[in-house]
Amino acid sequence: MTKPSDKTVTSEESKAIDFLSRNPDALMSYPDVFGNVSIPHQSGGMTSLVERQMKMLRDENHTLKKNMDELVNIARENEELNQRFHRLAVELISTDQLDDVLATVQNQVQTFFYTDYVRFRFLPSVLDRKNRLKAHYLSREGDVLKTVQPWISARKAVCGIQDEKLLKALFGDVVSVRSSALIPLFHGTELGLLCLGSVSESRFRKSMGTIFLEQLGELVSIRVQGLLGA
């Protein structure tokens, strides 16, 4: 047991400390003594051991309640997200036009992921005989393809703050994106990115979880790939 460096512990004190360490409930048999034990405040006052323990219990309960509230809120948010994800899946399954799929994803994702901008960006190698993707292709100019290709190949969503030039290429010059989530689209072959952008720097953080984002990418990819030849 660590002892204060500026106080010499007597033999009697040492015996008492050792006894109480081995018998932490001993004072419960002597309520009068227990109630009179005092501990100095930092301010110089005194408080009984019972009061001190009650304060510690209140602090612990407050911390536990705060943690429980946070867990309940997370569970509630996840449940809401699951319901919205399910509704999106149902709508995509019932949609048989590629244009409608793209529009549905953009509208629904903007709502249930609480984001400001949603963009599709397809690789130039993705063929669309009906030319429905002409407004959604990644430019061959500059370093955009070189930058995003490894992310698509890794099949992992990339979140956080990106280079302004890249964001302009993905979202357009007329919008201001401060943070983004870039979700790879692939199904059998690499398709491109589903880009979520926010005006808030803290909305999409580098450390945030990406399970829902990647599941969203898989769902959208399957539907897009299935309709490209239609």
Image (cartoon, rainbow, N blue to C red):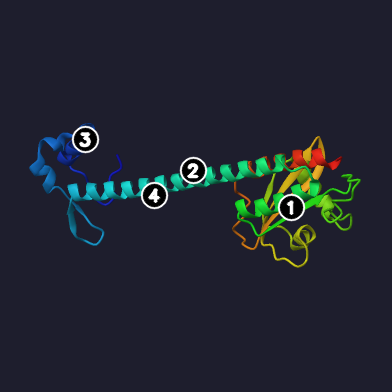
Q: Nearer the viewer, mark 3 or mark 2?
A: 2
The relative height of residue 167 versus residue 1 in the rendered view (above or below) is below
What separation in Å lies between label 1 and label 2 (alpha carbons)?
29 Å
Say which quarter of the image contains residue 163: bottom right
- Could you tell me the amino acid type at mark 3? Pro
Tell me, yes or no, if residue 112 can be seen here. yes
Viewer-proximal residue, 69 or 44? 69
Q: Which residue bears the numbered disc 3? A: 24
Secondary element at image label 3: loop
From what the image shows, is residue 189 above or below residue 137?
A: above
Which residue is identified by label 2? 75
Q: Are marks 3 and 2 in contact (CB under 8 Å)?
A: no
What residue is disc 4 on? 66
For label 2, the crowd category at 10 Å Cα-Cα, with few meaning under 14, some 14 to 19 and many 20 or more, is few
Q: Is residue 129 left or right of residue 153?
A: right
Spatial CA span between label 3 and label 1: 67 Å
Disc 4 or disc 1, which is closer to the eye? 1
Q: Secondary structure at mark 1?
A: helix
Residue 113 seen: no
Q: Dot 3, crowdedness within 10 Å: few (<14), some or many (≥20)? A: few
Q: Nearer the viewer, mark 4 or mark 2?
A: 2
**For the residue marked with disc 4, what is the amino acid?**
Lys
